[in-house]
Every structure is written in structure tokens, then in C-alpha cells.
Image: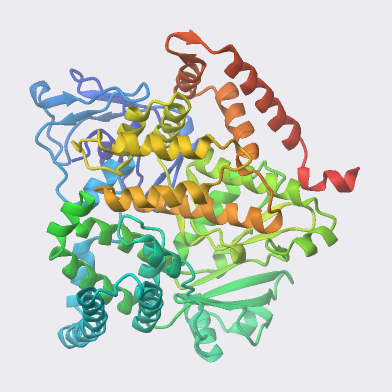
Amino acid sequence: MIDAACCLCRYAYGPLSMELCTASVSGSAQWSHIPTIGRVRRHGYVSSSSWVSQRLRQSSLYVMNAASTGALPSPKNITQLPRTNGAVVNNISNNKPSSALEQLDIERGVCIPFRKYTPEMVRNKVLGSRGSVLSLASRGVEIIWKLGLYWSALMYDFLVGRDEEIVPFRARQLRNLLCDLGPSFIKAGQVLANRPDIIREDYMNELCILQDDVPPFPNQVAFSIIEEELGQPLERLFSKISSRTIAAASLGQVYRATLRETGEDVAIKVQRPGIEPIIYRDLFLFRTLASFLNGISLQKLGCNAELIVDEFGEKLLEELDYTLEATNIEDFLENFKDDPTVKIPQVYKQFSGSRVLVMEWIDGIRCTDPQAIKEAGIDVEGFLTVGVSAALRQLLEFGLFHGDPHPGNIFAMRDGRIAYVDFGNVAVLSQQNKQILIDAVVHAVNEDYAEMANDFTRLGFLSSGTDVSPIVPALEAIWQNSSGKGLADFNFRSVTGKFNQLVYNYPIRIPERFSLVIRSLLTQEGICFTLQPDFKFLEVAYPYVAKRLLTDPNPALRERLIQVLFKDGLFQWKRLENLIVLAKENVSKMSSNPALKKNTT
């Protein structure tokens, strides 16, 4: 049970959540002082932004260190967990996570008192609907029949000894099968494409090209949903709207329109009709099946299969609620409000609802078209520098990052800014998770692979108590083989490929939020190589990290800086010199938009 953090939610703010890592609890005191750092996300998470919510900025909160029942724990029942980055978190002994979701909260370093997804809510919603038994039975038969046929084919291949040679065909067959089974399975396939802990790499490569582009549903249906959601006739809100969809996906489709009041061009995102009960039904069936696979999952991944389904279900239901996407956009707008190199579209919440989202139309250049970018007078290398910097700020500074930055969601503006669209799939990293990531970088720099393996346990890749000694040599081999080539040849894809082999051979689970991090880095690195094949991703990333280490007043980062500068008790003057040079390079590059430097010259 999550004591200190959840008390803040239950006693002080109700629907707000707090990062566990900020709790600093005295074992003998009844009251705990919890610093309130970070923006409070309205749909449950706390974003680790560099700014502080006005509601929390004015004073620190004192919250009672009690369980959810309100009873005060006695000192003898309180155990002090190891000090992590300067923060001590107390836990009540014998209070183990009572569910997979609670386990996820502890692992993430956040608690979420009001959720879009719980297994109980899904079960009640499905079983409480009319004709649920018949619907579940028919859908279950369809799924079991199609997946059963595919599994039988795999078993036949294995028995006749041709399972390896026919892999490319079976991988394509799996991709087509997931498309046939509908939106829930398409989304599941996209998740599996980033989960080397669950499927082998050759299948992942095939699922990576799995697109959720599907035939659009009729305009009349879409327009009816808009009118129903907004409560007004279409012509009263918009002076014109495109007769064809701009894009269609498994969960919704997009139109271009013009607001009647202001004449502004906007994008309208409309959810597919009747998709919610389909998603709920499939999630119920997924979790029912997962309950029978817990034993295998514990053995192979070190966690319950139900936990993996809960991670997937939570993100999927968040994507279904467009009000949450509107909140995501507002959070990104706030985070980048002082950054002249990044464009985030405005959201029109007065014209939006849970199934309709209206946002500013982005008139940009696709980021995979280098010729068009050059013709617009934009320096390609400068634009890539802007993109890498924006990605690193999302990951390491804000802890709120775009989870699906594929080429259709990133544009180059004609003024040199990078623009993002589609904020339905975002992920949150707590302050605790960010600090552990920095720990892992420090341990890699210091070649402390045993501690790097322990970082994987702290981040949730390995279950608590796992013997990391067999993994240490593998980590050392991966890192030395990749970093030994120098910056010129280092790329995330080669490291990820080796890491995929590691997680497939050891009981390692990639938490959903980190699978998004990996996918985000790989996708953006791929965009960089498309625009400039010899682009050095780390040559841009290192100066940013150096500047953060040298200038950030966060005590945790100061501690990491000391760890970097000392090795075996000796001060590393060369490292300090390199950090200063790299930080100066970052400040020089980002003092103005580097994408426009060539124009200015």
C-alpha cells in the first residue's frame, strides 16, 4: 500500500496524485513534510515539470503518514527503505501491493487515485451490459478460433523442423491476423513491436510496420458524432469542413475545418462509433486469458501476465478519452511556452469532448522530406538539433514525453520550429525514474555494470530480489561493444538490437513507459538518419546533458555530477573540462534557433 504519497491524494487534494519519490517521512513523527514539486496532471499523474503548479507553489503541504483507512501506523510497523537520491521513503511493513495496478504505481513512483482503467471497472462494464454473455461468447470463439489456427501452424512448423525458415511468412501472417481481429489487437500489435521481452526480434520487425491506417467510416456518421458531442449543428460551429478525411486510424479519424467565429483553420479528431464497448470487451477477454498465463509469465518475465494487460489497458482507455488528450496538449504548451524552437498546437476545449477534439491546424512540412525542408530555407542539421533538444527536454526535464513521434506526427514549420501533433499517447516519468535513468548513465560512464544492473531492478525491468550477477557480463559486453566505436558509429538501434537479445534470454520485463521511451528514441533517430544519414545523435545529446549536470540546481543532479567527476577516489579533471566544453557548445547552439542560422547568415 502506498502510504505517504496516497495520503496527500486522499486527505489533501482528492483527485490529485503525488510522486512517491518526493516523500520525506520521519519514522517517529506522525506528520510528514512532502515537497510539492512538479505540475499536477488533471487526469491523475504528476508531471515532473520544471515549473510548479500555482496551487502548490505557495506553501508546502504536511500530510498524515497513514494508511488508506486513516489509522496511524505505530513506529514498530514502519520500515525505512534505503535512501534514494536524498529522499527517504517510509513504508508500512506487511503492506504489500494488493493488485497489479498498485505494483505498477510503486514501480512508477506515482499513485493514481482516480483511474480510467481498473480490472473491476472493465468487468462490471462488460458484464453489466445487455447481451454481454452472448457477445463475450461469440467474440471469445472468434479469437480462440483464429489464434488457435495460427498457434497450430506454429506447432506444425516446429514438429516438422521448419520453424526457423518460415519465420518471415509467419510474422506477416501474425500482422494480418491482428488487423483482422480489430482495433484492440492492432494496438496490442503496436505494443508488441516494442516488447522484446515478450516476442522475438524477427516478429518485432514485422510488427513495427503494423499501421493502424484503416478505411474511414462515413462522413455523415462522423458529423453526427460531432454534433452530438458538442450539442450544436455543424454549420453553426464551422464555416467549412473537408469532405474527405485527412487521416484515418483504428480509434478515430481527422478532418480539416474552419471555425465560423474566428476563421481559424483547425483539425477535428473524431472517435470511431461504438468502439468503446468493443475495447472494453476485448480487455476483459485479454485479462481473463492472462490469468491462465501467470505461471509462464512469472517464469519468463518475473511478473504476472495480468500486470502486462493492465499496463496496456490503462494506456488504451486513456487514448479513448479525448479530454485527456486535450489536457496533454495543455501540459505540453505550458512546458514549452518559453521555448522559441518548439510549436505545440492550441486546443479548443470549448469545441471538444470525450469523443471529439478540436485543435489548431499545423501547416508544416513532413519531417521526412529533406528537399522540401531545404527549399523552405531551413538548415537541416539545425532542425535536427532542435528536435533532439526538444526530445531530451521532454524525457529528462519535464518527465512528460510524446510516446508516438512517428513521421506523421512531427513537422518542420517554415520558421524553423519543430511541431508535434497527436498527443493521445504520452508517457510520464516520475522524478524518481528520471534520477535512476541518470544514475544508469553515470554508472555506464564509470563502467560500474553491477550498479547498472541494479538500476534495471529499480526501474522495474527486473523483479525485486532477482540475482543480477548473470546479467552483468552481458550488459558490459553490450555497452563496451557499442561505446568503444566512438560517437561516429554509436546509434540506438544497434544497442537496442543487442539489448533485445538480452531481454529475450533473461527474465527481464520492459515496463510500458520505457518501451515508449525506447520507441520514441528509435523513431526520432530514424528521422534524423532520413534527413541526414551521417547525423550524430549523441553529439547533440551529450552537450545538453553536460549543461544539465553543470547548471541544474537540483541536489540529486549535483550528486550525479560529483559521481561523474570522481573515479576510484580521484578527481577527473579531463571529464570536467569536457563537460564545460560540451555545455558551452549547447548554450551556443541553442541561444537562437539553429534551424535558421543559415538563413540569417
Q: Is residue 20 visible?
A: no
As drawn, 275 above or below 534? below
Return the residue found at the far right.
601
Q: Residue at x 36, y 72 (%)?
A: 167
User: Considering the image in quadrants, where does the N terminus appear?
Assistant: top left
Q: Quadrant of residue 220?
A: bottom right
Return the residue found at the far front.
161
Residue 435 % position (x, y): 42, 32
Q: Is residue 393 visible?
A: yes
Residue 23 horizontal side relative to residue 592, left or right = left
Residue 212 % position (x, y): 47, 75
Residue 334 % position (x, y): 58, 46
Q: Quadrant of residue 141?
A: bottom left
The total of numbered circles placed on residues is 0
Q: Residue at x 56, y 37 (%)?
A: 485
Q: Residue at x 53, y 34 (%)?
A: 484
Residue 50 horizontal side relative to residue 338, left or right = left
User: Considering the image in quadrants, where does the C terminus appear?
Assistant: top right
Task: Please tell me which residue lies in front, 5 or 370.
Answer: 370
